[in-house]
Amino acid sequence: MIRNILFDMGSVLVDFNPLRFTVEAKLSPEDAQLIREELFHSIEWAQLDRGTLTDPELLEIMKPRFPERLWPSLEWMICRWDEPPVMVPGMYELVEELSRAGYGLYLLSNAALRHDEYWPRYPVSRFFGDRLLISSHEKITKPDPRFYRLALERFGLDPAECVFIDDVPVNAEGAVYCGIGAIVFRDARRLRRELQARGVRLS
């Protein structure tokens, strides 16, 4: 029986979407592609999630790789992408319903050290309390099995009673290798159906 729902954050609860960022920054298609490839797919971005780089350090590393006209966009996408905070549609309502139904809710996220600053600004954070495992705090990132095992140990969870939700298939697979059921996130409506198919009580 499922008793605990484990959530990824970016692109599951919080709208972290590099394509949206480049559109809102009014970048040309060429500049948008450059930022998506050279920033969000960089080794340094992975180091940001691991907590070995801070946001300001990443910005200074990236500046020489881009024309100066793109520096303001870089600064926003690295240091202020959460302004304003945008939720994934339908997820606040679904999480609220799960909370009312008595499920344990946990956040397992690859996120930078600045997570503690922006996470409380998202209304959905109220349902999670301190039940958070953040990669930059632990210096371990998904899909490393140690990340999921640490969550199970720290929160005293039985993997057979958990389901993990992530938009990245390899991260969902990492949970499966640790005995945790997993769902690859598409949208809130589909997630509702998939949770119900696993016996989760939802109206």
Image (spheres, grey):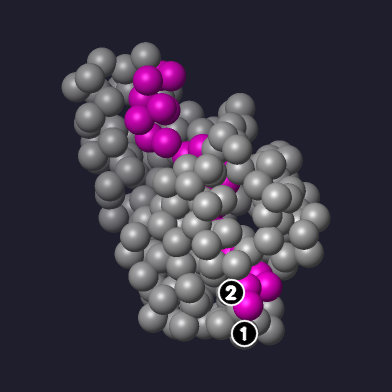
Q: Position of residue 140 (x, y in %)?
A: 46, 71
Q: Report the residue at 52% width, 62% height from top.
A: 197
Residue under pointer 2: 162
Residue at 46% x, 67% y: name it: 182
- Residue at image position (33%, 23%) is 70
The quadrant in which residue 77 appears is top left
Question: 196 or 95, which is in the foreground?
Answer: 196
Q: Is residue 174 above or below residue 10?
A: below
For label 2, the SS is strand
User: Residue 151: x, y in percent?
Assistant: 59, 76
Tell me, yes or no, whether the highlighted magenta stretch contains residue 109. no
Residue 183 lies, with reference to residue 70, above or below; the image says: below
Please state if 29 lies on the left or on the right of 93 as rendered.
left
- Residue type highlighted by circle 1: Asp
Q: Of residues 12 and 50, which is closer to you in this image?
A: 12
The residue that appears at 39% across and 73% down in the rendered structure is 174
Residue 13 forms part of the magenta stretch: yes
Residue 123, quarter of the rendered image:
top right
Q: Are marks 1 and 2 in contact (CB under 8 Å)?
A: yes
Relative depth, front residue between 74 and 163: 163
Identify residue for label 1: 158
Report the magenta residues as a range: 1-25
- Examine the image and state in which quarter residue 65 appears: top left
Spatial CA span between label 1 and label 2: 7 Å
